[in-house]
């Protein structure tokens, strides 16, 4: 193995929760940590290979003329649509390519983006369902509600997660274009100004996205548009728990809970006086949900009546983490301990009582959403044994993949890849390898603020190990890293905070590190295969 002399790094590589912990000596080598890192590398390899095979499997079913992937592989294989094919499946093919195949990313993935805009944009930059056999839109009439719904799904479920990882890109341009055009066609009158919809899913998605896009762009219009929606729900007569006779605490309804919470966090920093107006109404919503919306383990029912407390659908929501993201974010700014306790209670119940739980029957999508929710919250509050539960449930989800790489043959297959990538980034602590190769096994383990890394391959490999960065700040310019739906949590990040780090090989050969830009672009590695082990620590 060879590192170039004087590889650079001046940066903070740490978890915030470990900032004040003592660090290990450069000459102290804990074999158990490298053993864990090696085990993690096996999991990262399996996960990314499964994602690569998922992309390969679905591309075989792409339309032969347009290159677009179908909605599903059964009755809907003749259409591409925004709310499903574009929102749930395609973006995580893009993300897989970004991690495993740069040529595919610049080729087919980029071509699909360009083609879908050329063929499916119907009202400005807003897409509509396209039928391959017709070579035109599926229906002649324009259904504006359906078009806005599809665009909001594509933005929140697909393009926002991509932007969280990639930053500014052609995919973020697509996202902002659709977002602006949704509001250009906001025709629903309200006492607070025109809004795009009365659908709580659409409005919740828009609140989530604009709470982030406002910081990303610095454009006040996103704050103003968000305030219209927040006023409509919190100050008017559409409060989710005060006025509604049912509240759905799973997807296709729960988006309004986390959406209002995300905007509440944004307004806390952007307009504190407005935040004070919202505070009692946000707390009222969250308190009522805690009162009547959970089972004895702290997990949410699918649907409840907030007026009388009746449980309308007692199935346990696989999207418990989506709601708890909102609770935890509000806890972070308002210090309401009950909101953190709700998170800890739910996480604590998973390992003893919810192994191989039928979240949505046998669907891989239920596992994907449940694991994602747990992983995102575990990043903030590492409740044990949540880690062991996530490991076991990933095996259940992975077992659902078919030999051809397809998982279940519907648009939810993309969520399999989304959650798998989140899991892999946890096991590598945000480290990625470029170029990726199918035999490459990159794993990491973190203890306090020291990172143990193993890199294994069957033959010689040359490339770069790229450390994560504080994406919440650098890609989105967020004031802090609150838990967000479909984000990719940060673990071990490089930031410009003036702390010098060193890289030390297992055989005690030190590598000097000086200058953040080189660590960000990656540590250059040449080795002849087998295994190399090293660690990064504060110097």
Image (tube, rainbow, N blue to C red):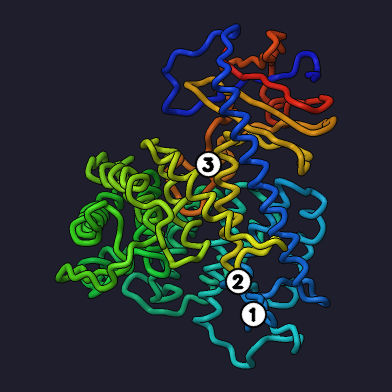
- Mark 1 highlights which residue? 74
Q: Which mark is residue 151?
A: none
Q: Is residue 120 above or below residue 19?
A: below
> Which residue occupies the extreme left position in the image?
308
Q: Residue furthest bottom?
A: 140
Upstream in sequence: badge 1 or badge 3: 1
Considering only vertical position in the picture, is 125 above or below 258? Answer: below
Gap in angstroms between the C-alphas marked 1 and 3: 39 Å
For the image, the number of numbered tags is 3
Taking the image as shown, residue 178 lies to the left or right of residue 62, namely: left
Q: Quadrant of the C terminus?
A: top right
Disc 2: which residue? 410
**Residue 226 appears in the picture as rendered:** yes
Q: Which is more toward the observer, 252 or 203?
A: 252
Horizontally, is 161 left or right of 315 in the view? right
Q: Quadrant of the N terminus?
A: top right
Q: x, y (%) of residue 253?
A: 38, 68
Who's the residue at 30% across and 50% down the image?
Answer: 275
Height in image: 134 above or below 86? below
Residue 272 visible in rendering: no
Question: Mark 2 or 1 closer to N-term?
Answer: 1
Assess whether mark 3 and mark 1 are in contact (beta carbons under 8 angstroms). no
Q: What is the CA distance from the residue labelled 3 to the residue labelled 2?
A: 31 Å
Residue 472: image tag: 3
Report the side of 198 relative to 111 (left or right). Answer: left
Q: Earlier in the sequence, mark 3 or mark 2?
A: 2
Q: Position of residue 31 (x, y in %)?
A: 58, 17
Q: Residues within 10 Å of mark 1 (few under 14, many from 20)?
A: few
| CB contact under 8 Å: marks 2 and 1 | yes
Q: Nearer the viewer, residue 87 or 444?
A: 444
């Amino acid at each position: 193995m060879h590192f170039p002399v004087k590889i650079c790094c001046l940066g903070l590589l740490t978890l915030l929760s470990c900032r004040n912990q003592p660090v290990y000596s450069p000459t102290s080598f804990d074999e158990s940590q490298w053993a864990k890192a090696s085990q993690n590398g096996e999991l990262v390899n399996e996960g990314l290979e499964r994602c690569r095979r998922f992309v390969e499997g679905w591309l075989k079913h792409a339309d032969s003329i347009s290159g677009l992937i179908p909605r599903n592989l059964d009755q809907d294989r003749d259409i591409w649509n925004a709310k499903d094919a574009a929102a749930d499946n395609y973006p995580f093919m893009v993300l897989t390519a970004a991690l495993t195949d740069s040529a595919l990313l610049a080729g087919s993935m980029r071509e699909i983006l360009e083609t879908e805009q050329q063929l499916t944009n119907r009202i400005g930059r807003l897409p509509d369902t396209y039928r391959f056999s017709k070579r035109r839109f599926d229906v002649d009439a324009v259904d504006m509600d359906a078009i806005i719904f599809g665009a909001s799904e594509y933005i929140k479920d697909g393009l926002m997660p991509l932007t969280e990882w990639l930053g500014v890109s052609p995919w973020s341009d697509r996202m902002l274009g659709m977002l602006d055009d949704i509001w250009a066609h906001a025709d629903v009158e309200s006492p607070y100004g025109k809004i795009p919809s009365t659908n709580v899913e659409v409005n919740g998605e828009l609140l989530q996205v604009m709470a982030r896009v406002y910081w990303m762009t610095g454009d006040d219009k996103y704050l103003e548009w968000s305030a219209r929606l927040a006023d409509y729900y919190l100050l008017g007569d559409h409060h989710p728990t005060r006025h509604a006779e049912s509240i759905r605490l799973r997807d296709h309804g729960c988006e309004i809970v986390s959406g209002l919470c995300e905007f509440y966090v944004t307004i806390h920093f952007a307009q504190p006086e407005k935040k004070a107006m919202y505070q009692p109404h946000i707390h009222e919503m969250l308190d009522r949900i805690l009162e009547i919306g959970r089972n004895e383990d702290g997990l949410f029912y699918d649907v409840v009546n907030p007026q009388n407390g009746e449980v309308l659908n007692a199935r346990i929501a696989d999207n418990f983490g989506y709601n708890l993201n909102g609770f935890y974010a509000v806890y972070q700014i308002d210090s309401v301990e009950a909101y953190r306790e709700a998170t800890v209670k739910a996480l604590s119940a998973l390992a003893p009582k919810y192994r191989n739980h039928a979240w949505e029957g046998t669907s891989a999508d239920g596992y994907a959403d449940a694991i994602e929710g747990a992983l995102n919250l575990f990043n903030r509050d590492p409740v044990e044994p949540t880690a062991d539960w996530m490991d076991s449930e990933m095996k259940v989800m992975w077992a659902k993949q078919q030999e051809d790489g397809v998982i279940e043959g519907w648009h939810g297959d993309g969520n399999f890849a989304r959650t798998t990538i989140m899991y892999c980034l946890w096991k590598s602590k945000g480290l990625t390898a470029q170029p990726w190769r199918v035999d490459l096994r990159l794993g990491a383990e973190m203890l306090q603020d020291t990172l143990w890394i193993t890199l294994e391959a069957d033959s010689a490999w040359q490339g770069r190990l790229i450390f994560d960065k504080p994406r919440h700040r650098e890609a989105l310019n967020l004031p802090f890293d609150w838990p967000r739906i479909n984000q990719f949590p940060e673990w071990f990040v490089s930031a410009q905070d003036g702390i010098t780090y060193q890289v030390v090989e297992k055989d005690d050969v030190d590598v000097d590190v000086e200058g953040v830009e080189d660590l960000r672009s990656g540590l250059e590695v040449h080795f002849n295969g087998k295994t190399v082990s090293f660690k990064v620590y504060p110097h």
